[in-house]
Each structure stands twice: as structure tokens, then as C-alpha cells.
Image (cartoon, rainbow, N blue to C red):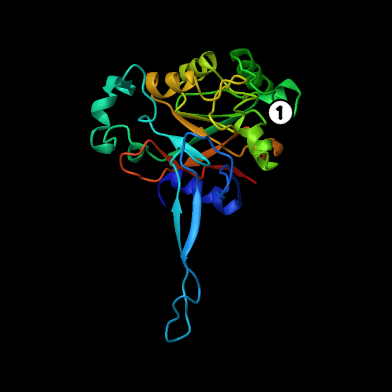
């Protein structure tokens, strides 16, 4: 307790904290990218299948899913460019044996750092962005200025497009946007964020970045910039609506991935923590 930082943290907790859950609830049939195995949940043992002598019974589950389903973080092993991963690692050699010893999900350190919400629709005066709309550098700069916030080294930048409203409404086809497109940053926006030294960046969309109408997931240039060129983690399918509605723009961001050895990503449950 002699550490002043620890004492300050404990004092803040004692005064009360508000925690915003930025992760989506995992449900069978939820909208997801068609490129990944779907989420499935079943009860192989139900109450009553086996009853102990004292009348007690237990149920248990089996879950199957891709590591890029629901709210998740992309490990640096997820994307390669011209056969190379981040740090000029040979992708073919790195995946030998069916797992990425280097850049796998088990190498993602827990994130406990400053988070910044960039509420782009609020800046542009709309409830959500249009299908396939690019979030430009001008949009990002205007949002930071409008909010009176800045991005610094080691921060996590969360980009709200309002597209998560389609997830909330159960409109999976629109949320996926395979034919209509999805709003998000592209190459220029990714470079803008990377140049500010962010540690990770996330969004309320299925693939983080701009998906042009009719293009599906054919091209993902922001993934190349962030994961391959700059070594910056990407968090996708976040729930940012409650955070935005509360007017919170800066917060303590907490995220820890599951330590799947050699995996290309992991489900996560990110949190935004603020004082009451």
C-alpha cells in the first residue's frame, strides 16, 4: 500500500467505477464474417442425465467457433502481405506445424491503458454512417477536435460508426454488408492512427475497415497497414453504443485475450472503465 499509484487506484475503486462492457454476447446464429467457422453451443450433459446420491446434478457445455467470431482481437499472425508477416517473418515457415509460435494469440499482452472513443457520427451530425462510407483522415481529425481529445503513444483508439445498431436490431445481413458495404477507415485512416502510436484500434463493424458496396471482404488494406506493417492489433465487432450514449470519450481500457497457443486471433470481452 506504500505505492502511491496502487493507493490511488484502490481509492478510485472505493469511490465507485462505471464499467462499460464493449463485447458482444455470443449467441448461435449471430452475424459474423462468412470466412470463419460459426459459433455453436450445446449441452452434452444436462441436469438429470446423472444424479448423485445426494440429489445433486450438473450440466456442462461444448462450444465450437472460429477465433474471429463475435468481439475478437486479431493477432499479428492473422494477415500476411506478399508472404511476410509483421517484422518480415516468413508466413509459410511461421505456420509450419499448424500453429504460429511467433505472432500467435498467446503473444498478445493484456491491455490496460488509456482508451479514446472517436465518435464519428456524432461529429458529422448523424446517427450512423452510410453503407460503404470511408472514415477519412479529415473525419478522424474533426472528431478529435470536436471532442477535445488527442491520441497518444500507447493508446487504444476505438472508432464508432454507428453500424453496431444493425447488430442490436438483429439485422445480420446489413451488419455484414456483403452487398451493401460497411463504413470504416481505409489505408489513409489506418496510417493516421498508426502514426500516432496507438497500441491497438477497434471498431463496431465486422471487419474494422471500409468495405465497398459489393466488394465483400475482397480487399482489407487497413489490415495490411496495421497488422503487417505497423504491428498494431485490431479489435472487431465491438459494442460502442452505450459508451457513446453516455458521452464518454476517454477511459481506462482493459482487454485480455485467451492464450490460444499459435492461434490467429481470440475472442475478447473489452471493458471501458470510468469514475462515477
Position in image of residue 36 (x %, y %): 46, 37
Q: Left or right of 169: which side holds 234?
A: left
Q: Is residue 248 visible?
A: no
- Please state which of residues 89 and 200 is positioned toward the viewer in this rendering: 89
Position in image of residue 101 (x %, y %): 26, 36
Vertically, is 147 above or below 43? above
Position in image of residue 81 (x %, y %): 36, 18
Vertically, is 2 above or below 266? below
Q: Tag 1, which secondary structure?
A: loop
- Please state which of residues 275 and 72 is positioned toward the viewer in this rendering: 72
Q: Residue at x 45, y 80 (%)?
A: 51
- Number of numbered labels in the structure image: 1
Q: Residues within 10 Å of mark 1 (few under 14, many from 20)?
A: some
Q: Quadrant of residue 162?
A: top right
User: Which residue corresponds to mark 1?
Assistant: 128
Q: Residue at x 61, y 51 (%)?
A: 16
Vertically, is 62 above or below 169? below
Amino acid at each position: 500500500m506504500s505505492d502511491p499509484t496502487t493507493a490511488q487506484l484502490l481509492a478510485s475503486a472505493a469511490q465507485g467505477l462505471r464499467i462499460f462492457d464493449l463485447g458482444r454476447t455470443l449467441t448461435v446464429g449471430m452475424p459474423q464474417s462468412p470466412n470463419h467457422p460459426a459459433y455453436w453451443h450445446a449441452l452434452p450433459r444436462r441436469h438429470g442425465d446423472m444424479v448423485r446420491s445426494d440429489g445433486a446434478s450438473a450440466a456442462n457445455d461444448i462450444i465450437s467457433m472460429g477465433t474471429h467470431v463475435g468481439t475478437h482481437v486479431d493477432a499479428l499472425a492473422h494477415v500476411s502481405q506478399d508472404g511476410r508477416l509483421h517484422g518480415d517473418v516468413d508466413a509459410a515457415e511461421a505456420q509450419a506445424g499448424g500453429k504460429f509460435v511467433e505472432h500467435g494469440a498467446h503473444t498478445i499482452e493484456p491491455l490496460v491503458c488509456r482508451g479514446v472513443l472517436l465518435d464519428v457520427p456524432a461529429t458529422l451530425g448523424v446517427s450512423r454512417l452510410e453503407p460503404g462510407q470511408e472514415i477519412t483522415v479529415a473525419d478522424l481529425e474533426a472528431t478529435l477536435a470536436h471532442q477535445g481529445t488527442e491520441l497518444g503513444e500507447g493508446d487504444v483508439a476505438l472508432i464508432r460508426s454507428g453500424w453496431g445498431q444493425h447488430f442490436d436490431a438483429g439485422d445480420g445481413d446489413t451488419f455484414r454488408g456483403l452487398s451493401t458495404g460497411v463504413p470504416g477507415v481505409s489505408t489513409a485512416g489506418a496510417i493516421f492512427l498508426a502514426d500516432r502510436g496507438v497500441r491497438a484500434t477497434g471498431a463496431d463493424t465486422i471487419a474494422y475497415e471500409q468495405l465497398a458496396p459489393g466488394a465483400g471482404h475482397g480487399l482489407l488494406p487497413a489490415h495490411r497497414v496495421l497488422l503487417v506493417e505497423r504491428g498494431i492489433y485490431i479489435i472487431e465487432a465491438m459494442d460502442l453504443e452505450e459508451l457513446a450514449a453516455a458521452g464518454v470519450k476517454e477511459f481506462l481500457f482493459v482487454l485480455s485475450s485467451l492464450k490460444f497457443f499459435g492461434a490467429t486471433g481470440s475472442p475478447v470481452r473489452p471493458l471501458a472503465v470510468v469514475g462515477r
